[in-house]
Image (tube, grey):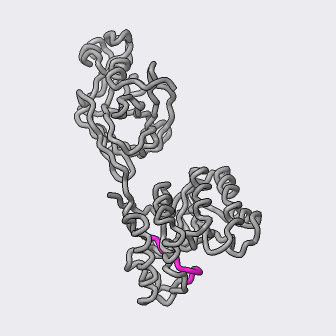
Amino acid sequence: MTRALSLLGALILFGSLAAPAGASAARGTPAPIRVQQASLRQRGQQLVWSVRTLAAFSPNEMQHDGRSLCLLVERLSPATVVGELCVKHPGSRRHPQLIYRHATRSGFAGGRVVAAAVTRADARELTATFLPSSIALGYRTLRWQVLTSVRGLGCAAVAGNTSLCGSRFPARPALGAMHPPQLIGCTTRGPAYVNGGPANRRVVALTFDDGPWYDTPQFLNVLEREHVVATFFEIGEQISTYGQGGAIERRMLADGDMVGDHTWSHPNVAGAGPFAASQISSTANAISRATGGFRPCLFRAPYGSVSGALIAEARSMGFTTIEWNVDPTDWARPGTDAIYQRVVAAVTNGSIVIQHDGGGDRSETLAALPREIATLKQRGFRFETVTQLLGAQLIYR
């Protein structure tokens, strides 16, 4: 790809230094949208872009009138424009979308829909939430500016372009401070006991028990290669032995995976009481030490042995008790093909799949995993952590 533009160069090339909108409006051409307030801030893992305009606007009308509302983003070092995010009319969708185009020497190229939540509190406001990675950025301080433009024959010539008028806000590019987010916890919501997710969404949660173990890094390799997340329920006493000084747990969280509590030494804790509480809290503390501060909110009882008393005990400690509705009994080592077939035959909307990355030879499960993922993707399933499946809130600092 050719070298990206400087921010000033992009502003000139794409008309944000154009003649005042009133000049074009007087000739009957729609004026660019005028911005009253705008901000770009970090919230946890997400960037939040908010815009408030002087007058009401409609993305559908914007398209009809040839007007645009875009966020221009620039790296600090080297000082180059990364690209622009522009508001697109929703079409058949309920909410507007964001289109990202990357910057080149000669202009902006491409055009793909960004995974973003776009909402409108009223007709003068728009807020978009998205990950920095969706626009080729890491968590580093950047510069930004809102660009609005309108195409029409009435626009004055700008940088040799007679069909583009525009404005910019703020007048000078603003700094947007970012830092690598640290996940420190999650909050329980909904039922205290769950064995499946929503049946109205084509999603599935892969979960793995009894780690960390020798094979856990290889499971993470597969998930990373396939761009899939999972939830790992860990045995506390194994974290110091197989967790590589916490590197395994930190890698999980950095990948977007979730870490859950599977007791300290894997006993039957269905009787609840002080013994169960100690098994759960000791593991939560070990996970916190390994990750540098993350406190889990998901608990899975060994052997799936639960009781009303245990579920209540876990909830009082801040945990949702998680079981499953797809079990290939991979722990019994029935063969790679059997594990694969049992998983893909049983998964439906909202399934929670239990498999094992630890506690024994898990080579069959590891070999089946890429095939499971490929088949479920082909069938239209998306992969979520259990916290995502349940809509739990993640807590960052």
Q: Is residue 6 above or below residue 235?
A: above
Q: Is residue 194 above or below residue 26?
A: below
At 65% from the left and 71% from the top, the residue drawn is 327
The quadrant where residue 318 appears: bottom left
Q: Nearer the viewer, residue 215 or 252?
A: 215
Where residue 107 appears, as percent x and y from the top left, is: 44, 21
How many marks can you see? 0
User: Could you tell me which quadrant the C terminus lies in?
Assistant: bottom left
Q: Is residue 196 left or right of residue 28?
A: right
At 56% from the left and 83% from the top, the residue drawn is 305
Q: Nearer the viewer, residue 111 or 235?
A: 235
The quadrant where residue 125 appears: top left
Residue 369 shows in the view: yes
Q: Is residue 178 left or right of residue 219?
A: left
At 53% from the left and 79% from the top, the residue drawn is 301
Q: Is residue 28 left or right of residue 109?
A: left
Taking the magenta stretch, the answer to whether it contains residue 335 is: no
Q: Is residue 151 above or below residue 37?
A: above
Where residue 18 appears, as percent x and y from the top left, is: 29, 17
At 50% from the left and 39% from the top, the residue drawn is 92
Residue 70 shows in the view: no
The stretch of residues the image draws in magenta is 298-305
Taking the magenta stretch, the answer to whether it contains residue 299 is: yes
Where residue 21 appears, as percent x and y from the top left, is: 26, 19
Where residue 258 appears, as percent x and y from the top left, is: 48, 63
Q: Nearer the viewer, residue 290 or 327?
A: 290
